[in-house]
Image (spheres, rainbow, N blue to C red):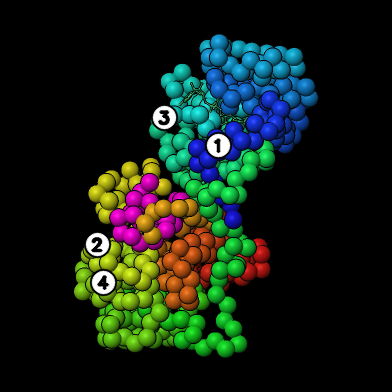
């Protein structure tokens, strides 16, 4: 499991560690890791032109000490000081001793334009609000330059705790982060600014503290996925009910069923007006012409994809005393009080637009502040909420505790109907007995991986993603 901790937690752990170590030891560990990553990126350090963007805090200190290490290996290193009086004194002295030079902010843009490598030490976890105006031209110059850009701890200007980006921020090719991932490195929009992320162990001890974010890895998902045993039959493996589709959107039913058939349940039961289309494509589906309450045994329901205006079916499913996944039109049609009143697990799977409608805010607000939005929805509905999009997040019922973040997705998944596949897949895992958090996060993991494997750099349709789930599943259980 990969984890990310809040700035407050990092600060506390750093204080405890610093109290036990000689002064400056932690910063030296950080600088050593940073310099090694810069050297890897440069390939040849000797003779390279390195520009350090140095703010007034310890983030700038890391950059200066790393710059000193690179200068000792023969790089030409220039530090651009945003605030010369407040630049880290020890770091500055070390850089000068190593033969590095110092320039004022006025020369920064020209230097950045000619650099091979730009090290962004403007601001790290001490940053508040967006980038300050005097730093903006340097961030812009770094983006325009052909230089590789390495962010120290975080790309300057992004919010470490939330992943929000207000105004300009540095766009990095690589972020070298210390001690732990910060939530902003895993959540869009900030994640996009970070480039690839390299974690440097500086000895922080965080195991005893709850993380802010968790990202499942192959081994975690492999442990959670259901495997039929010798005594299994289709009922013991779980029956998932799909109440989806309408005369107008029969395809949503087909796609939800296609996901459900690949999710580990022993049988998929379909109720709704698209039974002919479902059977034509997937003859193994059990179809019923009764409503959900009379459809027969079901261990978990999926309701909502392509449901149109069928509020009665949504209400019937929400009243069921088994785990329920509510998606798409179902999110709009479900009575909030009925959802809150449920005792069996509930998993809601909105995209940003649906989440915005439920919260009464704009879509941009949800996309800019995903973590707050998913926690808020999970709190309001007392349900597990999976917020889809470029970063998929899963919050526990009530919104407290660690939020799961999915790292496997690809923007090729932004294709009509791929959400329907996801809801079928997650519903199937619910029916197979996974908790709502595990079902949602494992489904997002498999769906993202299936998208990646099937797309392989080219456009795909939602049905291709569903067909790719078995390959993703195999990849997970075989350890990649
Ligand atoms: N505390 C520690 O033990 C360690 C800290 N490390 C580094 O120290 C950093 C944290 O250092 P600090 O607490 O000094 O804080 P930072 O260096 O992140 O930022 C604080 C400084 O930046 C300025 N600033 C704040 N917001 C800004 C904005 N939006 N735009 C431009 N400037 C802004 C402030 O005036 C302040 O002087 C970490 O991110 C990491 O890079 C590492 O050396 C590892 C060890
Ligand atoms: N930019 C993106 N990067 C990664 N995944 C994305 C992106 N945009 C959408 N997705 C994923 O694609 C799926 C789209 O679902 P949804 O928005 O419900 O579409 P639909 O309603 O057409 O099925 C979700 O799993 C979502 O997380
Ligand atoms: K930085």
Left or right relative to 347: residue 82: right
First along the sequence among labels 1 and 3: 1
Provide the secondary structure element on which disc 4 rests: helix
Q: Is mark 2 within 8 Å of ligand 2?
A: no
The disc label shown at residue 336, or none: 2
First along the sequence among labels 2 and 4: 4
First along the sequence among labels 2 and 3: 3
Distance of label 4 from label 3 (alpha carbons): 42 Å
Residue occupying the point 55% across, 36% down: 12
Q: Which of the two marks, 1 or 3, is nearer to us in this view? A: 1
- Local packing at callout 1 (Cα closer than 10 Å; few below 14, some 14-19, many 20+) is few
Q: Are marks 2 and 3 in contact (CB under 8 Å)?
A: no
Distance of label 1 from label 2 (alpha carbons): 39 Å
| For residue 370, above or below residue 217 | above
Residue occupying the point 55% across, 71% down: 225
On the image, the x and y values in percent for residue 394 come to 44, 57
Left or right relative to 162: residue 305: left
Distance of label 2 from label 3 (alpha carbons): 35 Å
Q: Is mark 3 within 8 Å of ligand 1?
A: yes
Q: Which residue is mark 4?
A: 314
The magenta span reads: 372-396
Residue 307, by quadrant, is: bottom left
The disc label shown at residue 27, or none: none
Q: Which of the two marks, 2 or 4, is nearer to us in this view? A: 2
First along the sequence among labels 4 and 3: 3
Distance of label 1 from label 4 (alpha carbons): 47 Å
Q: Nearer the viewer, residue 378 or 461?
A: 378
On the image, the x and y values in percent for residue 116 come to 66, 27
The disc label shown at residue 12, or none: 1
Q: Which of the two marks, 1 or 2, is nearer to us in this view? A: 1
């Amino acid at each position: 499991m990969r984890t990310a901790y809040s700035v407050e937690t990092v600060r506390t752990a750093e204080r405890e560690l610093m109290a036990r170590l000689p002064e400056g030891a932690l910063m030296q560990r950080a600088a050593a890791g940073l310099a090694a990553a810069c050297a890897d990126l440069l390939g040849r350090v000797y003779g390279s032109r390195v520009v350090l963007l140095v703010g007034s805090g310890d983030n700038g200190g890391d950059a200066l000490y790393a710059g000193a290490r690179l200068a000792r290996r023969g790089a030409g290193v220039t530090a651009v000081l945003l605030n010369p009086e407040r630049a880290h004194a020890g770091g500055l002295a070390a850089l000068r001793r190593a033969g590095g030079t110092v320039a004022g902010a006025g020369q920064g843009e020209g230097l950045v334009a000619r650099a091979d490598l730009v090290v962004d030490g403007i601001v790290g976890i001490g940053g508040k609000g967006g980038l300050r105006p005097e730093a903006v031209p340097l961030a812009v110059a770094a983006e325009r330059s052909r230089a590789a850009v390495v962010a120290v701890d975080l790309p300057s200007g992004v919010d470490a705790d939330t992943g929000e980006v207000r105004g300009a921020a540095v766009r990095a090719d690589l972020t070298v982060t210390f001690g732990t991932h910060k939530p902003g490195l895993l959540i869009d929009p900030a994640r996009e600014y970070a480039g690839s992320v390299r974690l440097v162990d500086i000895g922080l001890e965080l195991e005893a503290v709850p993380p802010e974010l968790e990202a499942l890895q192959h081994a975690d998902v492999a442990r959670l996925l259901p495997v039929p045993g010798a005594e299994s039959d289709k009922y013991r493996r779980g029956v998932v009910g799909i109440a989806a589709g309408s005369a107008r959107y029969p395809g949503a039913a087909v796609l939800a069923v296609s996901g459900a058939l690949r999710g580990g349940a022993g049988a998929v039961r379909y109720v709704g007006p698209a039974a002919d289309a479902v059977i034509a494509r997937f003859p193994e589906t059990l179809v019923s012409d009764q409503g959900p309450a009379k459809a027969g045994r079901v261990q978990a329901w999926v309701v909502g994809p392509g449901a149109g205006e069928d509020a009665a079916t949504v209400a019937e499913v929400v009243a069921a005393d088994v785990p329920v996944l509510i998606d798409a039109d179902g999110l709009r049609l479900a009575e909030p009080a009925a959802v809150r009143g449920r005792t069996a697990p509930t998993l809601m799977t909105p995209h940003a637009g649906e989440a915005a409608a439920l919260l009464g805010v704009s879509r941009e607000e949800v996309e800019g502040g995903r973590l707050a939005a998913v926690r808020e929805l999970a709190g309001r509905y007392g349900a597990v909420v999976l917020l889809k999009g470029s970063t998929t997040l899963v919050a526990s019922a009530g919104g407290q505790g660690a939020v799961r973040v999915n790292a496997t997705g690809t923007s090729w998944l932004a294709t009509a109907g791929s959400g329907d596949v996801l809801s079928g897949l997650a519903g199937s895992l619910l029916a197979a007995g996974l908790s709502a958090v595990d079902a949602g996060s494992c489904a997002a993991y498999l769906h993202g991986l299936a998208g990646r494997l099937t797309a392989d750099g080219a456009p795909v349709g939602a049905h291709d993603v569903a067909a790719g789930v078995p390959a993703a599943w195999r990849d997970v259980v075989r350890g990649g």
